[in-house]
């Protein structure tokens, strides 16, 4: 088993160059979904990938999962209709303290203020087959936090999303990909069944379910870069497309 998990943040036109890396346009996102379809990949929910790691499920050779970090409203407005068109499942990791509000944590980085998902949009996403996961209460650097703070962020975000949904929230993503053993243990103790990191690479049978690997799809990624990320789950991209013969060799390995 070698499964790529894709990580997106926002599906919208960037308002400011500072957020262009985080914003994949709806047009580019639709092209990504088309490439997944045309390359013959099956899109799986994270729960199925966790079953694959646990040895409870055999996954198709070409499998991929789609995730969104942060819980911005554009996931509901722009990504969901495209995902529904293709019939693809996905996961959205939500900063619970900003639900019904704005991406307050982005202020210190100069990111434009963006609307977050509302409680009712979160329920609609869940009803539409989107797995809802937690991403802390305040989008904190967990690995730099005191244990009691980290534990509270991890537990309270789960509880508050469960209140909104009336069902269990079982997956988590580390904000900024920032974790350490204390943080990982707190995620396990809080009762999650798996967690996404930002470590590149494909997920195999021996992958730690609390450090799932992901390839980040950036706003400016060209279709050929998306194709390499889908295939190899790497975040290290050559600046130019490899020449055709090299690419063919690369893709056939
Ligand atoms: Zn985040």
Image (cartoon, rainbow, N blue to C red):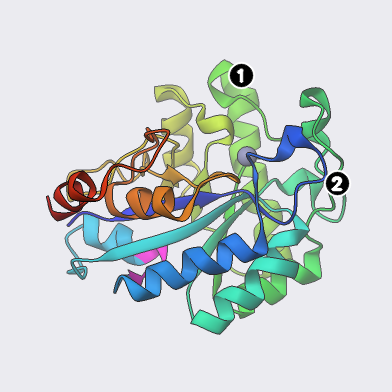
Q: Position of residue 231 (x, y in %)?
A: 29, 54
Q: Position of residue 61 (x, y in %)?
A: 18, 66
Mark 1 surroundings within 10 Å by alpha-carbon count, few (fewer than 14), some (14 through 19), many (20 or more): some
Residue drawn at x 65%, y 25% as measured from the top left:
149
On screen, residue 207 above or below 226: above
Number of the front mark, 1 or 2: 2
Let me know if residue 221 is in the magenta part. no
Which one is earlier in the sequence, the residue at label 1 or at label 2? 2
Magenta highlight range = 42-47
**Between residues 17 and 127, which one lies in front from this camera angle?**
17
Q: Secondary structure at mark 1?
A: loop
**Between residues 87 and 207, which one lies in front from this camera angle?**
87
Q: Give me the disc on residue 145.
A: 1
Q: Is residue 96 visible?
A: yes
C-alpha gap between disc 1 and disc 2: 23 Å
> Split into 4 quadrants, where in the image is the N terminus?
bottom left
Q: Secondary structure at mark 2?
A: loop
Q: Position of residue 240 (x, y in %)?
A: 40, 37
Q: Position of residue 173 (x, y in %)?
A: 52, 43
Residue drawn at x 72%, y 57% as measured from the top left:
12
Query: CB atoms at circles 1 and 2 under 8 Å apart?
Result: no
Judging by the rendered image, the residue that carries numbered circle 2 is 102
**Between residues 182 and 141, which one lies in front from this camera angle?**
141
| Residue 78, image quadrant | bottom right
Residue drawn at x 63%, y 39% as measured from the top left:
21
Whether residue 109 sits left or right of residue 198 in the image: it is: right
């Amino acid at each position: 088993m070698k499964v790529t998990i894709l990580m997106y943040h926002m599906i919208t036109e960037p308002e400011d160059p500072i957020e262009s890396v985080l914003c994949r346009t709806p047009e580019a996102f639709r092209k990504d979904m088309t490439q997944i379809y045309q390359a013959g990949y099956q899109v799986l929910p994270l729960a199925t990938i966790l079953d694959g790691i646990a040895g409870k499920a055999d996954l198709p050779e070409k499998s991929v999962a789609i995730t969104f970090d942060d819980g911005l409203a554009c996931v509901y407005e722009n990504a969901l209709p495209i995902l529904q068109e293709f019939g693809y499942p996905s996961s959205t990791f939500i900063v619970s303290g900003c639900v019904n509000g704005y991406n307050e944590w982005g202020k210190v980085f100069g990111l434009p203020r963006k609307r977050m998902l509302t409680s009712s949009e979160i329920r609609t996403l869940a009803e539409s087959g989107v797995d809802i996961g937690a991403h802390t209460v305040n989008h904190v650097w967990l690995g730099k936090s005191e244990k009691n703070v980290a534990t509270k962020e991890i537990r309270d975000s789960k509880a508050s999303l469960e209140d909104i949904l009336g069902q269990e929230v079982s997956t988590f993503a580390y904000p900024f990909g920032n974790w350490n053993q204390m943080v990982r243990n707190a995620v396990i103790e809080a009762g999650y069944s798996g967690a996404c990191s930002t470590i590149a690479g494909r997920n195999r049978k021996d992958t730690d379910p609390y450090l799932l690997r992901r390839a980040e799809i950036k706003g400016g990624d060209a279709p050929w870069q998306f194709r390499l990320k889908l295939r190899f789950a790497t975040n290290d991209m050559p600046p130019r497309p490899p020449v055709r013969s090299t690419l063919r060799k690369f893709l056939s390995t």
